[in-house]
Amino acid sequence: MKIYPLNSGNFKLDGGAMFGVVPKSLWQRTNPADDNNMCDWTMRLLLIEDGDRLILFDTGIGDKQSEKFFSHYYLSDHNSLEPNLNKLGFGLDEITDVFLTHLHFDHCGGAVKWNKDRTGFEPVFPNATYWSTEKHWKWATEPNAREKASFLKENILPIQESGQLKFIEREGDFTKNVFNNVDVLFVDGHTESMMIPHIHYKGKTLVYMADLLPSVGHVPLPYVMGYDTRPLITLDEKGKFLNKAADDNLILFFEHDHVNECCTLQHTEKGVQLSDTFRFADLF
């Protein structure tokens, strides 16, 4: 089994939206904003090579939307997923599984592309099974007004129409062995049934954080995104996770932190806090 971090591009989001009720004077210490109050974020993916399976975790934003849409997010290094896959010696047709933590556009947009004559859409990974959950799929295809702008039908419906969609069964809040050496934690604060993969690798557990913990700057418990649909549930889920991460020395792998790839946490007199930050390659 081998794990490869991948970058699918960088973008910007409003700092206030990313930190909710936390004052800018506090969050800008870790995530400085530009003159438009926008902070830098990345779309960092994971690729697992395990026997004859090549499993990709999330896909980034993709390239289907209009220039106006993309202009809101100040993209850089856009569409770097395929070149970065190629650098590792893999092609799009070799991906066997695409695991979508949830269906917000910056996590699943790269799963679907225009067809050659731009009359419709098709999967980017022609031989892959795309994995979601039944509850989240229903949530995304019948969106509430708050999240509707994040669930874009052109990113979602073509996956089902292709016949490549399958659902991971949710067994309570934690399902074991969805893949070899991969367990999944389900959380509902950010959006319904978001999946947080726990990957057992070389004697350690690597957790792909998705939007439960977007960055090191979100480690303090009250630092919850304004995007979360159920922030009080996020507080509870996040509190439980932070304690477990510190207890079990989990390796947190950040999807969105522009600077820090991984971190560990520790218990202190002031609660769970950051222990160390490092690159994936420096640990493994």
Image (cartoon, rainbow, N blue to C red):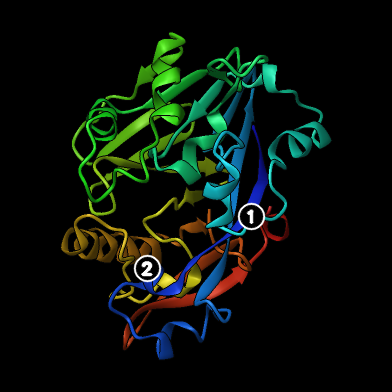
Q: Position of residue 181 (x, y in %)?
A: 48, 33
Disc number placed over residue 32 in the picture, else none: none
Camera-side residue of 99 and 74:
74
Nearer-N-terminus badge (2/1): 2
Quadrant of the rendered image containing residue 63 = top right
Q: Is residue 261 left or right of residue 179?
A: right
Q: Position of residue 153 (x, y in %)?
A: 38, 29
Camera-side residue of 57 and 147:
147
Q: Compared with residue 212, is residue 219 higher up or lower down, i.e. above or below?
A: below
Q: Position of residue 230 (x, y in %)?
A: 19, 57
Give the class, few, some or many, for how many residues have Cα within 10 Å of label 1's Cα (few <14, many ≥20): some
Residue in the picture at 24% in, 60% down: 234
State the residue lying farthest toward the top: 163
Residue in the picture at 49% in, 84% down: 28
| Residue at image mark 2 | 17
Q: Compared with residue 163, is residue 254 higher up or lower down, i.e. above or below?
A: below
Q: Position of residue 148 (x, y in %)?
A: 29, 43
Residue in the picture at 24% in, 51% down: 146
Secondary structure, mark 2, is helix
Tag 2: amino acid = Ala
Camera-side residue of 282 and 123:
123
Residue in the picture at 42% in, 25% down: 131
| Residue at image mark 1 | 75
Secondary structure, mark 1, is loop
Q: Is residue 107 left or right of residue 104?
A: right
Q: Compared with residue 280, is residue 137 higher up or lower down, i.e. above or below?
A: above
Tag 1: amino acid = Leu
Calculate the distance from the C-alpha at mark 2 to the C-alpha at mark 1.
18 Å
State the residue lying farthest toward the front: 68
Q: Is residue 183 left or right of residue 277?
A: left
Quadrant into which the N terminus falls = top right
Quadrant of the rendered image containing residue 85 = top right
